[in-house]
Amino acid sequence: MKGKRKGISMKNKRSWRKHTDIRDVENFLDDQRLEERLGGSFNERKDKDIFVDDKTPDTDLSAKISNKKLNASRPLRCFQLLQPWTSVPDPITKRNRVRTKEERKSSIRKLIDDTKRKNGIVKKKDLISKQSRQITKALKQNVPKRGEFKEDIWESDEKNPLGDGEWLDEETNRHVLKNIGKLKVRPSKTYAKNRSKVLPSGLPATEAPHPGLSYNPSFTDHQDLLTKIAEKEMKLMKEEEHLNRVTSNMFSKVTPEENHNQWMSEMSQGLDKTLSSDDDNGGEYSAINPPTSFLKKKTLKTRRKLKEAKKEAHEKQKLKVEKKKAADIYRLRLMAKEISNKEQKWAAVKEKRQKKKASELNRTKKLAKRKFEEPDIEFNRPHEIAGNLRALQPEGSILSDRFHSMQKRNILEV
């Protein structure tokens, strides 16, 4: 245990030099000189200038590992079959080979092709090959490097990387977009007959429910919901009454005896008339066609006159056509007006079809035998409304709602 420090006089410089502790300053200066001798301050130097990676193995490689490395440097055994297995040289030093299509061309054909190429006459397959090479080159240039993130994956405005691509086929676009990962998934082709035109509906995937379906709705909203449900039920009842009126109630009920008597009378219709006609004829044979006479045979004179009349009628018809052609020259204005009227009519029909097609985007189509029907609305009566979530009675099913929504949007068939 240290004793109490004695009082030291510090009234002159000698005492200060003798009794002042300067070891921390000396240690700092020693460290600084050491860093200067080693190449500078460690705080200012980089890690690679201070540390060294020791890549030499601690132990020597085993014989098994060294053999594996040696075998890896040798050629594969499957390629040994391609190597010559004898030391005898090949007696045929120059072998025949199949010349390419360009080499087989004659000098005249090559001259003709060069002349056409200079004049700008190129084959279609050469143009397609050139376009394919341009697309491949552009795609290779647009491939991002590893670690580069230049595009915003959350960007809502998606653009076609191929541009307009009017000269590209649909299958070519689909193939390229699929391989670069920018292909939009098309709807299934099995749910419609006309696969190229039927697309899913423009309706939203989830629709906002009626305010009256809330667990604590207002009186007006709840009464509005009940009114809609009552109108729908009245409509169904009216349709059912109509079907009963035009089917079951239209026909009177018949007993089995009356039904049998009616069947007998219907089956026996015409039997008596057929028997009496057979008795009147007495079993004699009667031909369907009337009898012919030799005196009614056409003579040569009659045949000649018929031939001349036919030829004259044919000439009159030709003359009539020629007159109509001459008259049409003076009807050019009228014909131009008729053509313009037809074009206006076709334009109106085209516009009408486009409007109809646009209106059908939000319409549920019939994709199978049955037609889609809106499901019944789940609702609570006034005395069943709880007013809070704790006492709420669950109604309906989320799975059923999603299923009906997909049917309504032309994704699933009914």
Image: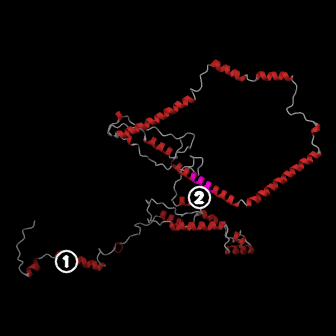
> How much space separates mark 1 and mark 2, taking CA atoms?
83 Å
In percent of width and height, residue 266 lies at: 70, 23
In percent of width and height, residue 182 lies at: 51, 59
- Residue 84 visible from this viewpoint: no
Q: Amino acid at mark 1?
A: Glu
Q: Earlier in the sequence, mark 1 or mark 2?
A: 1
In percent of width and height, residue 375 lies at: 47, 39
Q: Nearer the viewer, residue 334 or 166?
A: 334
How dense is the environment of label 2, judged by Cα within 10 Å: few (below 14), some, or many (20 and up)?
few
According to the picture, the residue beneath numbered tag 2 turns out to be 170
- Residue 345 visible from this viewpoint: yes
In the image, farthest residue toward the top: 257
Query: Is residue 181 covered in magenta?
Result: no
Q: Main secondary structure of the magenta part?
A: helix
Q: Say which element carries label 1.
A: helix
| Stretch in magenta | 343-352
Quick check: 258 left or right of 2? right
Q: Are marks 1 and 2 in contact (CB under 8 Å)?
A: no
Say which quarter of the image contains residue 78.
bottom right
Q: Is residue 175 above or below residue 271?
A: below
Residue at horizontal 19 percent and vertical 77 percent from the top:
26
How dense is the environment of label 1, judged by Cα within 10 Å: few (below 14), some, or many (20 and up)?
few
Q: Nearer the viewer, residue 264 or 317?
A: 317
Q: Amino acid at mark 2?
A: Glu
In percent of width and height, residue 246 lies at: 57, 30
Q: Say which element carries label 2.
A: helix
According to the picture, the residue beneath numbered tag 1 turns out to be 26
